[in-house]
Image (cartoon, grey):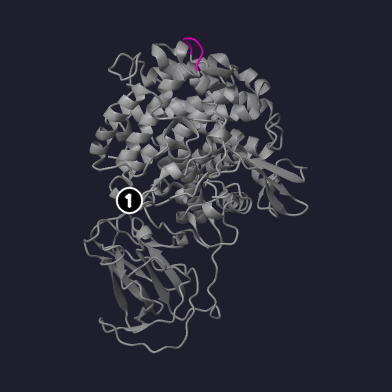
Amino acid sequence: MDPQRRRFLRLGGLAAIGALAGCAGAEPTNENTPSDTATSTPVETETATPEDSAGMQTTSEIDYDGWFEETDNFDGTTVDARNQDSVTVAVGADGNGGGAFAFDPPAIWIESGTTVTWEWTGNGGSHNVVANDDSFRSGDPTDSGTYDRAFETEGTVPYYCDPHQGLGMKGAVVVGQPDGGGEQAAQDYDWQAATFDSYWYSLYNMSTNIAMSGNGVPFPLNEQMEQLRDQRLPAMLENANVDRPPIANPNLSFAAFTEGDPHFTQQPVLEDDSGRPDASTLAWDPEQSSGVVSPSSLAWTHLKGVTWAKNFQAHFDILPGDIAPRFRAQLLSTLAQVGINAAILVGGSRENGALTHGDSFEFLSEYRPSEGRIEDETRRLHHHAAMLWFLSDMNSLAQNGWFGYENPRPLIPREAGADAVFDPPVGIQEIADGVASTTMDLFSPEDVASQESTRSVGLMLAAVGYYGPQAGSDEQLSAAVDYANGLAGVIEDNLDGNGMVQNGAENQAATQGIVAQGLLWASQMDGVDHTDTAEAVLGYLTDTLWDDDAGTFASGESDTTYTITARDAGDITGGLNAADAVLELPGTKETFARFFDETFNTGRLQRAQRPPSVGGRDNEPPLPPEAGGEFGQAAVYNAEIGYDTGSGEWSVTDDSFQTAGALYLANQDIWVGNWAGDFYQGRGIPGQSDEPPQ
């Protein structure tokens, strides 16, 4: 089942944010593209064909297999224009939700060689025309113009409007006499389908964690935060030009706990009388949460928030007002800044920061906020890598003047000494540079693999790659380049001739993936180039560890059972994304599609899904009410799954929600996700999403 069959349904709630934001391409033109790819075959039977108002005949006996399920201006009939050399379809006709969000006629039947002209009415905002199999695209959404296409290949070509597909703005062109014996051909689960689902699963995990679950330190926590909320919330609403938040009774968190149980404790209300999800009914059992915060759980959650703040701004012009994108961008940036303050700056001195030690930027490993107690004061490299990655992108948000950071007012200024809400007025640039310097001093490249593993070397390489474009001085950048080259040298010292990275994680595929991504991300800095090593590492991943029978990656060459955690899946996804986005390695798209479908869907790494990603295939995750437990489960990742090569069966081996792994994976998902780059500029490559759209 192809990805566009997954319905965008309603736009209320965090689980549907960005539903209309996946638009890219070029302006509509009058150029004809001489051929197309027919994607499926309708069911045709003999039927009477009465005349319609345009003088063309209609038939009601073509089966589109549910394509028009949400299209209210399609009444089951297809306009028969087989006797015409050209056909015109109106773009922005009346329909679908009381607006001008329809194609008219929505379904036409033509002979091979006929030209279809889509003509914009100027109503309903900006529209475009996109083939469901991506064989043609009119360009970016616009409110005027025409687009012509000649159809040669027999078959059925469903199409849609990018911004308004969720409202039912769909069409179809039936060309010639489709074959197939009356059976509609199923479309393979492909790259587009996988990146569509990765986009949605990423969103479910982020929105649930930061605004629904209550699995973290609540905002507001104290009287000072209440005052901040009471001052800031009205200003955010005013800047966003909306009357209320898009979620009722949100469980906002500025510091996520490390672990929780995503089973609902009462009947969930995903749409209340106001059309919004009621987050008070979506909270998890606090008794089952760890109650502990780690640098990784905080960093990966807010890195995801920063990513979405940028996504919203990139699509302010086409996102519907119902989802309040400007409000969300401000809210996510606010929570991230509150999280930084609590973790690093609280109490007027870093000595009292929850996760830092003394006046340095050395991060402790675990902190229990309810008791003000340090659970683990060990300095661990993977926590520092997570914080460096997050703070680098947060600095990008601040230094480049993104809307969400600037409005209503930055809580942490760009530079030290500027006006700030928090005390002391430490700038975000100083924090990012301080964390980078402390990390590079604290963990020498030679010690990284011995302290943790070569997997952590790969993670740190990726984090340093993100820091490079954000370094506050030439001296800082030079230190990052030297550090990255030192880390790459550690990888080369642990590299077998076949590309296998020694001394890594238990899951070898995960090691290969994050090491490859780290090498390629760091190689974006001048003075760093380890692309050849990355290509060798990826070769071992895709040639040796790929199990074609299972449709996933072996955790080791001789393993008969594969254990895959959410973090493992994030490492593999990151490697495949880098392989395609940077190296453009042949076959990567096909490999990712199978890996994602088997591991995330069939293997149930994703435990549930919301309606926007529903496609009706047998192996899809269930809806939350059917996902287990008395009231169902949130649409988030399981901590661990396993595959038995002997039986060919998957099983969930750890059904907890582990925040760091899940949100790390959610970040990797969005960089590869939503048709692989249409929605998030740059595919996660460092420095590619620093500048806000003009």
Is residue 198 something one can see in this rendering? yes
Q: Position of residue 663 (x, y in %)?
A: 52, 37
Give SS at disc 1.
Answer: loop
- Magenta stretch: give its range: 356-360
Residue drawn at x 41%, y 11% is: 349
Query: In the rendered image, which quarter is residue 539 located in?
Result: top right
Q: Number of marks in the image?
A: 1
Q: Position of residue 85 (x, y in %)?
A: 32, 79
Q: Position of residue 69 (x, y in %)?
A: 42, 68
Between 438 and 629, the one nearer to me in the picture: 629
Residue drawn at x 75%, y 45% is: 561
Query: In the rendered image, which quarter is residue 471 located in?
Result: top left
Residue 400 lies, with reference to residue 121, above or below; the image says above
Residue 631 lies, with reference to residue 124, above or below; the image says above
Residue 432 lies, with reference to residue 524, above or below; the image says above
On the image, numbered disc 1 is attached to which residue?
274
Q: Residue furthest left?
A: 122
Is residue 237 magenta-colored?
no
Q: Amino acid at mark 1?
A: Ser
Query: As drawn, is 441 to the left or to the right of 313?
Result: right
Query: As drawn, is 512 to the left or to the right of 198?
Result: right
Q: Quadrant of the C terminus?
A: top left
Does the magenta stretch mainly form a helix, a strand or a loop?
loop
Is residue 357 magenta-colored?
yes
Residue drawn at x 35%, y 42% is: 312
Q: Residues within 10 Å of mark 1 (few under 14, many from 20)?
A: few
Q: Position of residue 648 (x, y in %)?
A: 73, 54
Between 242 and 558, the one nearer to me in the picture: 242
